[in-house]
Structure formats: structure tokens, C-alpha cells
Amino acid sequence: MPSCPGDPLGSSTRADGCLQFFPEAFRATLRAMTAPDRLVRYVVDGVAHHGLERADHLARLDAPPWQGGRATGARDDPAAARLSPCTPGKIVCIGLNYIEHVKESLTVARTAAGPAPPAEPLFFLKPTSSMLAPGAAIVKPRGLTRLDPEGEMALVIGRRGRHVSESEALAHVAGVTAFNDVSARDWQKSDSQWSRAKGSDTFAPFGPCIALGLDPRDLALELAVNGGVRQRARTSEMHFGPAFLVHYVSRFMTLEPGDVIATGTPAGIAPIEPGDTVTVTVEGVGTLVNPVVAESA
């Protein structure tokens, strides 16, 4: 399949098994078109809409695809203000899921053989109030010494599931997006829980779209600050793969359509400062861009 618009890392692939929960008519539409799979959310006349990116317009849907959304026939301006591409009930984040990142992490227990990766996935939640739209500003809180971005590939759930088997897990995934797990390191070190360090306002940028049906198992991932690449990996390097993560998380909590699972960050973490611009690029998705500002007095 040709690469999606705005995809500088290479060509994308599709796993139609990820589309099983969509109506057949919608699946047929996706298969028949050359670049149908970029679902976005945007504002027209003060109202939020879902739509599919086309070459010269946004094809408005009456709901997201996992709610049976269909094209309304409205053609919206592609320059419309963008929002986060879905409205999750919860944002699940996976920690320490790339071995090289485990080695650099300050929160990992050391053994005689070196830092030990977790035996089971480590996960935590971000509140939906921490969501940030593409292009909006990450705010560095007053008094904070170190604020880090963490580039990640995130899964968007398309079908409700509890105790999902690993073999069926990707059939519950609507698509893939780019995610930035913004982290306040001062608070991560000082607090016994990570709610403040990981869940403050503006600490969960994701987008710019959801690549519907994109196979998440071997995608290029890259984070850059002011154009300089800091993190680069492939999702095939994850300690726990996408299907296992869906399976594992669903053992403990029901996954609902629109929920987001951020799958962990690779090595290369370093701080950001007001005035910086952070980009997260996922193959087949495109690039999430967010500037950084200081919290106002």
C-alpha cells in the first residue's frame, strides 16, 4: 500500500484483521481507496466532527467508524482546526517496554546482570484532562526542573473487550496513532504514584490522525526536538508486542471503543524547555507536532 500523506518514514502496511469490527461497507471503502485510512477530528463552526482525510478536503462522518459512522457528504476544509483524533474513556500507558530504555531508566531496579526488564507489562493511566491536540502547546509547570517527552506508538481500541485472547487482540484495534508521554521527572522521582508526573494538563498529546487498520507490529517510530532526532526505533523491538498488551490490559479492565493504549517509549529520553518544538512520527500515521511553553504566572 502507498505511504500515507505526511509519512516521511516509509511505506505503511495494513492488517485487514484489525478491521473486523467495522461494517463491511466501510471495510470495502478502506480497501478500495489508495489512502483512506487517516481518521481525524476537527472543528467547523464550533462543532467537533470526525472525518477522513482526502487530497483536497475532509470527508465528514456522522460518528467515528467504531460507532457505525458513515460519510455525510459534507466536504470540509482540510485547514480546519484539529483536535485529538478520538475521545477515549481512558488512556493506558505502558512503561519500560523497550530494552534500551530500561537500561537508561532511573526507576528500574538494578541487578548484578544490569537493569532487569519487567516480567509483566507495567501500566498506568493518564486522565483524559491531560489530552492535547496536535499543534497545541505542552505547558512546563512552574517550579519544575526537568520535563521530558517520550515518543510512542499508540493503539486505538475499536471493539469492546474483556479477557481478550492474544490471538484475537488485534481484531479489537481500530488503528494506530502517534503519542507523546510527557513526563515531569522531578515528580516521578519524588512521588510514590505517577499521577502528577504523568497526568498533568497537556501531558498527553496524540494524533495527528488514527491510521485505520494499520498493522502496529513493525512500524518506524521517531521523536525529534527542534529537528534533532532523539529517539528512533521500530515497534518490533518492543519487549511486549501490541497483541499481548491488548490481551494483558483487558485482563484487568474492560477496553472500550476509543480507548488509547500508548505502548512505551524507546531509549533517548532528554529534557525539553519552553521554546522547543517536539515531533513524534510513526510510520503510516504521520507527524504529531507540539510546541513547548512555560506555565504563565
Image: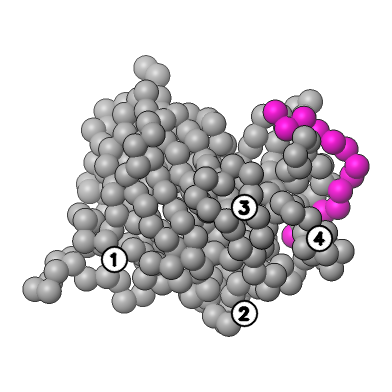
Amino acid carrying label 4: it is: Ala
Picture disc at residue 168: 2
Residue placed under numbered mark 3 in the picture: 3
Q: Residue at x 84, y 68 (%)?
A: 24
Q: CA distance from mark 3 to mark 4?
A: 15 Å
Q: Nearer the viewer, mark 2 or mark 1?
A: 1
Query: Who is closer to the viewer here, 183 or 211?
Result: 211
Asked whether residue 241 appears in the rendered view, the answer is: yes
> Horizontal placement of 177 versus 19: left or right?
left
Q: Is residue 68 magenta?
A: yes
Residue that label 1 marks: 99
Q: Is disc 1 placed on a helix, strand or loop?
A: helix
Q: Nearer the viewer, residue 33 or 83?
A: 33
Residue 204 seen in this snapshot: no
Callout 3 secondary element: loop
- How far apart marks 1 and 4 lie (CA) works out to 39 Å
Image disc number at residue 32:
4
Provide the secondary structure element on which disc 2 rests.
Answer: helix
